Image (cartoon, rainbow, N blue to C red):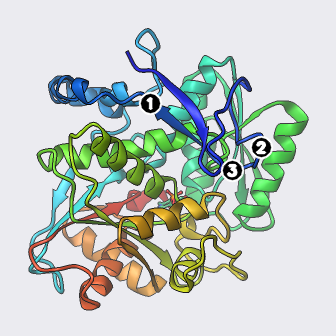
């Protein structure tokens, strides 16, 4: 039986009470889910994960997800996305390059994994009203999962959010508020709304379960590679839930002795908003706010991240790194993925553009297995 508790990612204080949980009551930093991981149960888990049908999606890993045996998830079939091998691609010919194609999730992005997990636990705590600040994809996803659970979703979006996102959020039943500003300004409005109405704020890392959903991307990758971790991943990083989740998944697989956590994690950001890249290069433990954030990669337009220190720790501990690419390079690479039959939003293109830069810099070696995250379908925007 799964048992889990919550622990602060900074001061390790165990969280108690406070349902649904938010951040650490002592230091305000994100909480992480901790499981009792027993090596002698690992073989049974691998058998169960391999035997369960793909249509159970990400919840087939339920032994290391925050779900007790008698509980049912709020699910739309998220996860179980394909790991598509790219044919020899210019500049990366001597690598095995795979794309984790997250555009195939229910609302077209990887956000569905995190929001399925977050909405599931919140609903089990009696929540029915949600609020989120979003660059776009998370808002669509929350609207879909909240509606699915019979609840409501208030979504704060920057005023320049593409019309397609606004329309999709509305179609999924979301109640939209446009904000003259960036996602950080939307975050402030969401916080104020939550305090006023008791709606549950599922902002990035302000609740602990979105990371758990996101970590299933890495579990699926390791499973698809025959229970071997890839040599490197290249991840388009905004708030960092996917990257932190990937690192957590590897640590849990290693604790269970299922796979070695030998993967180097590389964060890719946009040149017009690269707080993590700058902090990584400066050797800083935390990232300073990026002023004048400007990029067409809306998911990467995050000037400051609550989990900055966790992202930087994961990059350093894994001996990976961080790289910024231009919007032009990311768009061209997204089109290139399109010509390979993979429908990629600009953020997915950024991962391919970054992989080329890493290869040129000698950070990816011949023969290595590298996974690029295509975090959303081209049509999301
Ligand atoms: C398409 C896309 N890629 C990447 C990101 C960054 O996600 P994370 O919070 O995991 O860093 C986002 C976040 O909005 C996104 O929408």
Eyeballing the image, is 156 above or below 291? above
Per the rendering, the mark at residue 132 is none
Q: Residue sitting at 58 percent across and 33 percent down?
A: 6
CA separation in Å, label 3 and label 1: 19 Å
Residue at 18% across, 57% down: 84
Task: Compare residues 9 and 289 and report the one nearer the observer.
Answer: 9
Q: CA distance from mark 3 to mark 2?
A: 8 Å
**Residue 350 horizontal/vertical position (percent):** 40, 75
Q: Is residue 368 left or right of residue 160?
A: left
- For residue 170, what is the image quadrant? top right
Please tell me how crowded label 2 is: few (under 14), some (14-19), or many (20+) other residues with Cα within 10 Å: few
Q: 255 above or below 187?
A: above
Q: Residue furthest right?
A: 196
**Which is more foreground, mark 3 or mark 2?**
2
Q: Nearer the viewer, residue 209 or 78?
A: 209
- Disc 1, ligand 1: is the CB inside 8 Å? no
Q: Provide the secondary structure element on which disc 1 rests.
A: strand
Q: Cα distance, mark 2 to mark 1? A: 22 Å
Q: Which residue is found at the position 83% from the left and 52% from the top?
A: 189
- Horizontally, residue 33 falls left or right of residue 152, namely left
Along the polypeptide, which appears first: circle 2 or circle 1?
2
Residue picked out by circle 1: 35
What number is the disc on residue 26?
A: 2
User: Which of marks 1 and 3 precedes in the sequence?
Assistant: 3
| Label 3 Cα neighbours within 10 Å, binned few <14 / some 14-19 / many ≥20 | some
Q: Which mark is residue 29?
A: 3
Taking the image as drawn, is residue 143 in sight?
yes
Q: Position of residue 292 (x, y in %)?
A: 71, 82
Where is the N terminus found, in terms of image quarters? top left
Task: Determine the secondary structure under disc 2.
Answer: loop
């Amino acid at each position: 039986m799964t048992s889990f508790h919550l622990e602060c990612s900074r001061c390790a204080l165990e969280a108690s009470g406070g349902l649904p949980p938010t951040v650490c009551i002592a230091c305000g930093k994100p909480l992480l889910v901790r499981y009792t991981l027993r090596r002698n149960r690992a073989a049974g888990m691998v058998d169960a994960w391999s035997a369960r049908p793909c249509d159970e999606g990400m919840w087939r890993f339920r032994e290391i997800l925050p779900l007790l045996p008698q509980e049912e998830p709020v699910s739309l079939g998220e996860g179980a996305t394909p790991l598509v091998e790219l044919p020899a691609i210019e500049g990366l010919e001597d690598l095995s390059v795979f794309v984790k194609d997250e555009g195939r999730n229910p609302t077209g992005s990887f956000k569905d994994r995190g929001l399925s997990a977050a909405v599931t636990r919140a609903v089990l705590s009696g929540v029915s009203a949600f609020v989120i600040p979003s660059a776009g994809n998370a808002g669509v996803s929350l609207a879909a999962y909240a509606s699915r659970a019979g609840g409501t979703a208030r979504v704060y979006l920057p005023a320049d959010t593409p019309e397609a996102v606004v329309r999709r959020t509305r179609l999924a039943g979301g109640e939209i508020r446009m904000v003259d500003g960036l996602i950080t300004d939307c975050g402030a409005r969401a916080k104020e709304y939550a305090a006023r109405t008791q709606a549950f704020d599922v902002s990035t890392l302000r609740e602990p379960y979105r990371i758990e959903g996101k970590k299933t991307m890495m579990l699926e990758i390791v499973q698809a590679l025959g229970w071997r971790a890839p040599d490197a991943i290249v991840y388009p990083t905004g708030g960092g839930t996917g990257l932190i989740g990937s690192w957590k998944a590897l640590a849990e697989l290693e604790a269970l002795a299922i796979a070695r956590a030998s993967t180097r994690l590389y964060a890719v950001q946009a040149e017009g908003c690269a707080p993590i890249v700058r902090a990584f290069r400066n050797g800083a433990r935390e990232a300073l706010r990026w002023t004048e954030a400007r990029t067409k990669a809306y998911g990467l337009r995050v000037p400051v991240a609550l989990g900055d220190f966790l992202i930087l720790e994961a990059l350093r501990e894994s001996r990976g790194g961080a790289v910024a690419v231009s919007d032009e390079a990311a768009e061209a690479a997204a089109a290139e993925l399109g010509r390979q039959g993979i429908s990629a939003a600009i953020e997915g293109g950024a991962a391919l553009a970054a992989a080329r830069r890493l290869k040129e810099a000698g950070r990816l070696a011949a023969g290595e297995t590298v996974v690029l995250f295509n975090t959303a379908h081209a049509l999301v925007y």
